[in-house]
Image (cartoon, coloured by chain):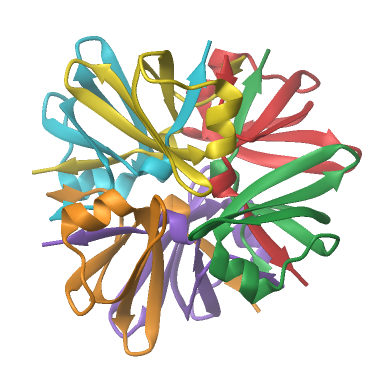
Chain colours: A yellow, B cyan, C red, D green, E purple, F orange
Amino acid sequence: MKISARNVLKGKVVSVEKGATTAHVKIEIASGQVVTSAITNEAVDSLGLTVGGDAYAVIKSSDVMIAVD
Amino acid sequence: MKISARNVLKGKVVSVEKGATTAHVKIEIASGQVVTSAITNEAVDSLGLTVGGDAYAVIKSSDVMIAVD
Amino acid sequence: MKISARNVLKGKVVSVEKGATTAHVKIEIASGQVVTSAITNEAVDSLGLTVGGDAYAVIKSSDVMIAVD
Amino acid sequence: MKISARNVLKGKVVSVEKGATTAHVKIEIASGQVVTSAITNEAVDSLGLTVGGDAYAVIKSSDVMIAVD
Amino acid sequence: MKISARNVLKGKVVSVEKGATTAHVKIEIASGQVVTSAITNEAVDSLGLTVGGDAYAVIKSSDVMIAVD
Amino acid sequence: MKISARNVLKGKVVSVEKGATTAHVKIEIASGQVVTSAITNEAVDSLGLTVGGDAYAVIKSSDVMIAVD
């Protein structure tokens, strides 16, 4: 599957924390650069996400803001 | 200002393309890893974004999906 | 690629309208039920979207609201 | 109330699962086509959502991605 | 129609700027407090939005971030 | 830090409710006008959010819908 989302960042799962319905998954996409994702517990199970596994952080461009100092 | 968004990725602006109302800004957050953002033209002007400048890509965790091969 | 987004609705592209930077793509996911998507022109080109082609509308659960009459 | 969101898909509630703060609600919008929504528990109560009730899945166009095989 | 989005802020339209496909609409929700919205041109026409008219800014809770100084 | 999000609404925190992973924070941005935000518990801790404190609700324009009666 090829997706319209312009941001597909390859990395490794460094943590998976399930809540009651919402899970937080962290992916290291570059040395020391970790991206946090909030997805459904159901998705964690469906994708079989576990610490150490390969995964992508996928982000639609309209969800990316820019900031400057 | 400190923000609740868990993802604040430092980088350099590599392109700014203004449309009629919506602009696309690309930021290189690691060697070869570019993030695309769609923001208002107004924000581009307000932040004074130009190619080569330092900037952050800011993304709320609930806007980050995960994918696996 | 398998994605965490819980909503992957199969359909056919019924229109593609490019703007200056943002395109609107409509997909018929069931008889008479059309979903409108706003994506980058760049994504339209990258995916080679054309009227009549098969495609999926992909939506993260946290972006779906519920309404009642 | 008439809303700017271009996607208002009529269906029936097929499940409501409350978490600690976030609920997952599933709506069948066509035979066999189910949409998953993550909303606040507070919204579930405010709308009186129960299995079998009529409801709409409402999605802003800028939150719809497109994918192809 | 009653919606799950927890934020429905009443105000008056103070500007409507159409782009090629995306429009920017500004609503004053309190004295001096203006909210900017990016929606489709199609939605502007469908809702008949004009300067001076009553309107609501509607925002899903999961799209609201918090910041502190 | 200066952000591209066009909506930065100053107010006071009126409630903080932590869930298993997701917290709901309410901010009064004008007399009687309260905005609800769903953010990670981690962000609540990181920002040190407590009832009565000053805070901003930050919203990207593309996440604001418009409705009319």
Rendered residue at 81%/35% (across/down): C28
How far from the left and from the top, in percent, is residue E47?
65, 67
How far from the left and from the top, in percent, is residue C56?
70, 26
Seen from the viewer's position, the closer of residues C46 and A18 is: A18
Q: Is residue C56 visible?
A: yes
* Residue at the extreme bottom of the image, as rendered: F31
Is C12 rendered above or below residue E30? above
Rendered residue at 28%/21% (across/down): A28
* Residue at the extreme left of the image, as rendered: A69
Q: How many marks?
A: 0
Which quarter of the figure is the C terminus of chain F placed in?
bottom right
Rendered residue at 75%/53% (across/down): D15
Q: Quadrant of residue F27?
A: bottom left
Seen from the viewer's position, the closer of residues A32 and C32 is: A32
Answer with left or right where residue F42 lies relative to residue D41.
left
Q: Quadrant of residue B1?
A: bottom left
Is E27 rendered above or below residue E52? above
Seen from the viewer's position, the closer of residues C60 and F50 is: F50
Answer with left or right where residue A25 lies relative to residue C52.
left
How far from the left and from the top, in percent, is residue C43?
52, 22
Seen from the viewer's position, the closer of residues C30 and B20 is: C30
Q: Is residue A3 visible?
A: no
Answer with left or right where residue F66 lies relative to residue C48.
left
Q: Quadrant of residue E62?
A: bottom left
